[in-house]
Amino acid sequence: MTSEAVRRVQSGNPWEESFGFARAVAAGDRVIVAGTTAFKGDMLYGEGDPYEQTKVAFATAVDAIGEFGLGIESVIRTRVCLAHSRDVDEVGRAHKELFDSVRPVTTLLVVEGFIDSRVLVSVEVEAYRGAVDS
C-alpha cells in the first residue's frame, strides 16, 4: 500500500500529539477510528453518566469518519470498553439509539480502567468506504 492510499486526520485531542496517533485513518476501503472517550479538549462530557458518555464518544467517532465523507450508515464495526459492568444496559441503550438501523458487529469489553478515572466508556469505530448494501 502506498502512502497516498493512507490518509490520517486529527481531532485536536491533546493525547493524539503526546502519544503520536491519529483520531482516524483511512486505508483502502476502511476507515478506523481510535479509542474515543467523551472528552472534548479538556472537558469531559457526561461525568458519572455512562449513557451520555457513550453518546458523546460515538458522536466524536462519527464526526471523525465524516472527515472522509462517511456517515453512520457506513459503520460496520464498533468496540465499546466499559470501566464497570454495571453500565452495560445504559451503554447498550445509547448504542442501540445510534446504530439500530445500521446493525454493525459489536464487541463489548469491561476493562480495568482508563487513564482518567472519570472516563466510563471508550469506543472504537470501523467504517467501510465501498457501496452500502442493506
Image (spheres, rainbow, N blue to C red):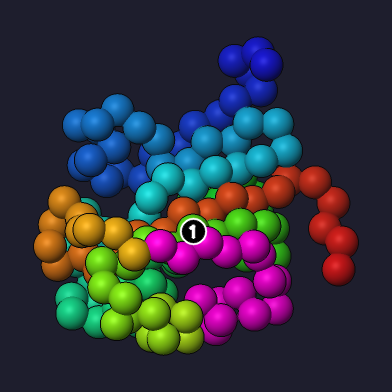
Describe residue 108's horizontal placement relative to residue 43 as left or right.
Answer: right
Q: Residue furthest top?
A: 2
Say which residue label 1 marks.
79
Query: Is residue 82 in view from this perspective?
Result: yes
Badge 1 marks a residue whose secondary structure is: strand
User: Residue 87: x, y in percent?
Assistant: 32, 80
Q: Read off the magenta span.
A: 94-109
Q: Quadrant of the N terminus?
A: top right
Q: Nearer the viewer, residue 127 or 104?
A: 104
User: Residue 26: x, y in percent?
Assistant: 59, 36
Q: Is residue 86 magenta?
A: no
- Give above or below for 25 relative to 72: above
Q: Quadrant of the C terminus?
A: bottom right
Describe residue 101's horizontal placement relative to residue 39 as left or right.
Answer: right
Residue lying at 60% horizontally and 25% vertically, measured from the top left: 6
Rendered image quadrant of residue 77:
bottom right
Residue lying at 24% horizontally and 31% vertically, measured from the top left: 19
Q: Nearer the viewer, residue 41 or 25?
A: 25
- Give the crowd class for mark 1: few <14, some 14-19, many >=20 residues within 10 Å: some
Q: Amino acid at mark 1?
A: Arg
Query: Is residue 63 in view from this perspective?
Result: no
Q: Exactly how many numbered labels are in the figure?
A: 1
Rendered image quadrant of residue 111:
bottom left
- Give above or below for 98 relative to 124: below
